[in-house]
Amino acid sequence: MQFHVGVIAGDGIGPEIVEEAKKVLDAVGKAYGHEFSYEPILMGGCSIDATGVPLTDEAIQQAKGSDAVLMGSIGGDTRTSPWYKLEPSLRPEAGLLKLRKSLNLFANLRPAYLFDELRKACPLKEEVIGKGFDLAIMRELTGGLYFGKRETKKVDGVLQATDTLTYNENEIRRIAKKAFSIAMQRRKKVTSVDKANVLDSSRLWRKVVEEVAKDYPEVTLDHMLVDNCAMQLVKDPGQFDVILTENMFGDILSDEASMVSGSIGMLSSASFNDTDFGLYEPSHGSAPDIAGQDIANPIATILSAAMMLRFSFKLDKEADAVENAVKTVLKKGYRTVDILPQEKEEIAGFTQVSCSRMGSLIADAVKASA
């Protein structure tokens, strides 16, 4: 089969980690008889440098013409990069928000699970880790505070900033359906996270989610306030299956979940609309401080490519092969620096590898398993 993949390499470590994901996809193609073609798409700081804006209309059309989009990371150092001297609508992240809106990517799925091989990298106590955890955060992606009306103005001589959080019932219903559908493929439990004790938007959220739940009688639904959820993620992450939440809460909670998994460099991400199309990217940022050093961890991007195989291309066997290849390489003791044990007495038996070497090892493992 042939698949056309739009590729947003982005900024910082983005080009390095995307290259390794493409290497693994090509290994899948050779092993299973598929062909992946890649079309580069500019977005983020690199697009600002080339075109003056973080995302052009041409880039949006390129993305729409792809079967799926694989993305690295965008942005730079907010303290020193000239990109952040521009007005907010011209900064790198504005391109990502525009792309999500243009492609109607309203649902973001971020799995967070603990590889047995990385238990020692998890910051939680062994008694908290228990048998491990495997959860997924379904985050609404095109509404809420990030897309609401905002302004900064002087009121009675004092600067005042306003950000508006708005959701309508249709936006809530469609993301809730996505969450319950994913739960049906997992352990059939949804935890809807809100701030219903304070916010009207959360009270509407809770009402609509309960309505959707009636269509999924096999799925258990419970509600949790966002502050409690933040605590529970570090107290007992194994209690969660699918966490459903709005845009800003999901942004924060998914980063927290990634860190209890051992390293944000391990966490994949997928954004969906109502079709098979998806945008696949790692959960981490562009890490400009290590860009060009060949030390970044490409596994999150490689696992994002596996999600692309599974959800957009319906290639479950090939996705399994990539995920199993990652486990095989980790089991053999290969580690990028971010997941290498920090205590000297624990380093024995592990081999530190570069970004490019890790990609090659996983690609070779895919070929060997076919």
Image: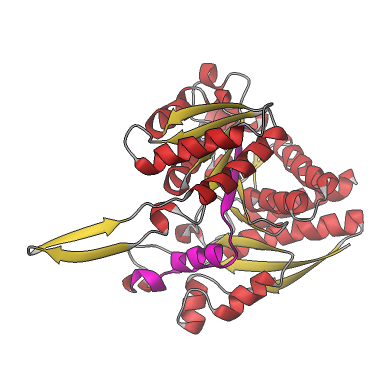
Q: Which residue range is magenta in the image?
A: 87-114
Q: Residue at x 70, y 33 (%)?
A: 184
Residue placed furthest toward the top: 127
Residue 13 visible in the current orientation: yes
| Scheme by which the image is coloured | secondary structure
Residue placed furthest toward the bottom: 51
- Total numbered labels placed on residues in the image: 0
Identify which residue, 122 or 2, lies in the foreground: 2
Q: In the rendered view, does 23 fall on the left or right side of 103?
A: right
Residue 323 lies in quadrant: top right
Locate the N terminus by quadrant. Answer: bottom right
Residue 147 lies in quadrant: bottom left
Q: In the rendered view, does 253 fall on the left or right side of 335?
A: left
Q: In the rendered view, does 342 fall on the left or right side of 69?
A: left
Residue 261 visible in the current orientation: no
Reply above or below: 362 against 125: below
Q: Residue at x 51, y 22 (%)?
A: 236
Q: In the rendered view, does 179 fall on the left or right side of 195?
A: right
Please state the horizontal and vertical placement of residue 261, each as a whole percent of the image: 56, 35
Q: Residue at x 54, y 33 (%)?
A: 210
Please state the horizontal and vertical placement of residue 44, each as a whole percent of the image: 50, 70
| In magenta stretch: residue 362 | no
| In magenta stretch: residue 110 | yes
Reply above or below: 206 against 276: above
Please state the horizontal and vertical placement of residue 295, each as a whole percent of the image: 57, 54
